[in-house]
Image: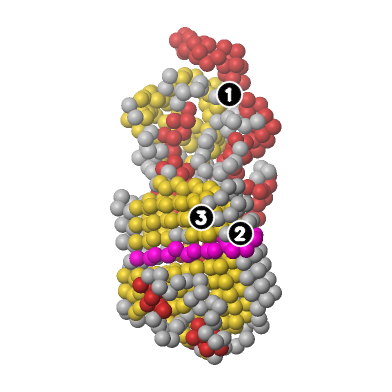
Amino acid sequence: MRSEKEQQLSELPENVKESALLVGVDPSEQERSGSFFQVDQNVLCARSVQPGVEVLSTEAALRQYGGLKEYFWQAVDPTKDEFTRAAAAESVPKGYFIRTAPGVETIYPLQACLYIGKEGMAQKVHNVIIAEEGSHLHIITGCTIDTHIKSGLHIGVSEFFVKKNASVTFTMVHNWAEEVEVRPRTVAHVAEGGTFITNYVCLKPVKMLQLYPTVHLNGRGARVVANSVVYGRKDSVIDTGFRAFLKAEGTSAENIARAVATDRAKIIARGHMIGEVPGIKAHIECRGLVLSKAASIHAIPELEAKRENLEMSHEAAVGKIAEKEILYLMARGLSADEATAAIIRGFLNVDLTGLPAKLKKEIDKIMAMELAI
Amino acid sequence: MDELLRIDDLELKVGARTILNGFHFVLHRGEKAVMFGPNGAGKSSLIYAILGYPGYQVTRGKIFFQGRDITELPTNERVKLGLGVSFQNPPAIRGIKLSEMLNVCRPGISPDEAARRAAELNLTDFLARDINLGFSGGEVKRSELLQIIAQQPALALFDEPDSGVDLENVELLGRRINAYLKDNSGLIITHQGYILNFIEVTRACVLYDGRVVCSGDPKGILEDIRQKGYEGCVKCRVRKNDEK
């Protein structure tokens, strides 16, 4: 299905392309089933090359589908806070609409890039992602900024609907700057037998990042896996979290978080699992490394069991790099700095779940580049 | 034979405790020596001192490696000069795989060679695992040996290569260490000596009371220790020294 915009990403300025590559968005569009690219509040392209896979701007989708009444603002509450209200106040909503038709599987991942190109820009996007029954959808989203820009605001509302026996793997890489504030607001609904996998990577400094995606497992056997890898540097304040409501028997939720804080960064790592029926499984694993005196990590794992016969657990460990690990690597020839960097890389190297091999390689490459300390 | 390692009149302290005192030791290229000593004699501390681990303070004496004074060098510089160690209890590191460690030991080692070497030590399935995480005693020691084989150091130090290893693994390890040492130099530190059933060493020393109290034919010394214990062995050697 082809959409209205046809700008070639290969024609983008070199610096934009380079920034996009660093968040997993390939302007050559090789091995991608579709692309979406938004600079500031302008949608440059929204297209799919695979039948049964729709990529539209949210604006076009609202027009085409009579306002998307079953979906638009149905997962996220527009009155939740000042940021959702700001997004809801946009007369022409930006962002993307992605949908896979029943039974369709994306051959290659879809990619979406949200790019801030103007100093002080307030970018607001509203994304709607739907995997129809039995379909399988892979998306990589990169949010980034022009290398010359220091300040900005990014508000991203994302609403996910994973239908019966469908799956969505959503990998998001953030790459901001020291004076940028970021407020994603994400809610997903997962039906019977559905799987939602979300991977989040943020390795660059940011002024203030606050995200707390919430997943409702509504149908029997629905599953969510949430992985996050956060590296807080300079004066970054990063409040990340993940919340899952387990509302049906046989549902399971797993949250794996890695956080490294250095310089004067403050990281809050939240995890909240709410078991509402018997026969559910939930697990939170949070590991943190604090590398400097002025940095801090606050891990807040919460388990709420509202019925009998549930399996809920968490493990959280926050500390420093063990000297014996550094020495072990030095005894193999690395300098103290190289050993420290290798340990941090290894620490953050979570096996991001459900990624196609090619995408995994790309993410590994991004991690290696960003963490070449 | 040229000198590979020379330790002159070493006094080693850990905190306020003196571990080695008046310690002399020379190892020549091509030698495969074994250092015996009772628990707590300072054998592992000796290895950490040779490696230059912080906390192991050389308060007197010098360590020379391949003719160069390394007493003040950081650990990785010593390793670059050709020192390699098989540790007794190495730490597990999450997120760093055995295959990556081999690449640290020998930058650019081909995946084929890494796979072949790992197979020889029954470690094929361990290449993709986080180093030492959940490894058994024998697996740790085989993985340490694999790293030494990858590194090919001028001098390999083996710290208790048979501790915590079941008998079957001791034989496999011993035979592999022996094969490695055929063309290389090494110093094996051991409390028990069982692994020496499978390794041909050229010389044995006994570390006791902070220094080397005797040095000579490995079979004879091991026999003495087995029959009389360390104390008995030391008495005999001290007496012999007195007679001189």
Disc 3 packing (10 Å; few <14; some 14–19; many ≥20): many
Q: How far apart are marks 2 and 3 (CA)?
A: 13 Å
A257 in relation to B52, above or below: below
Task: Indicate the position of residue A179 as horizontal and vertical percent values.
Answer: 31, 70
> Does the magenta stretch mainly form a helix, a strand or a loop?
strand
Which of pointers 2 and 1 indicates the residue nearer the eye?
A: 2
- Which quarter of the picture shows residue B49? top left
Tell me the residue that label 1 is attached to. Answer: B192
Give residue B189's position: percent from left, percent from top: 53, 29
Is label 2 on the same chain as label 1? no
- The amino acid pointed to by label 1 is Gln
Which residue is the site of mark 3?
A273
Image quadrant where residue B167 sits: top right
Q: Examine the rendered structure and indicate whether residue B12 appears above or below residue A50.
A: above
* Numbered mark located on residue A248 in the image: 2
Please name whichever residue, A31 or B43, is drawn nearer the observer in this view of the structure. Answer: A31
Q: Where is residue A118 in the image (x, y as percent from the top left)?
A: 35, 81
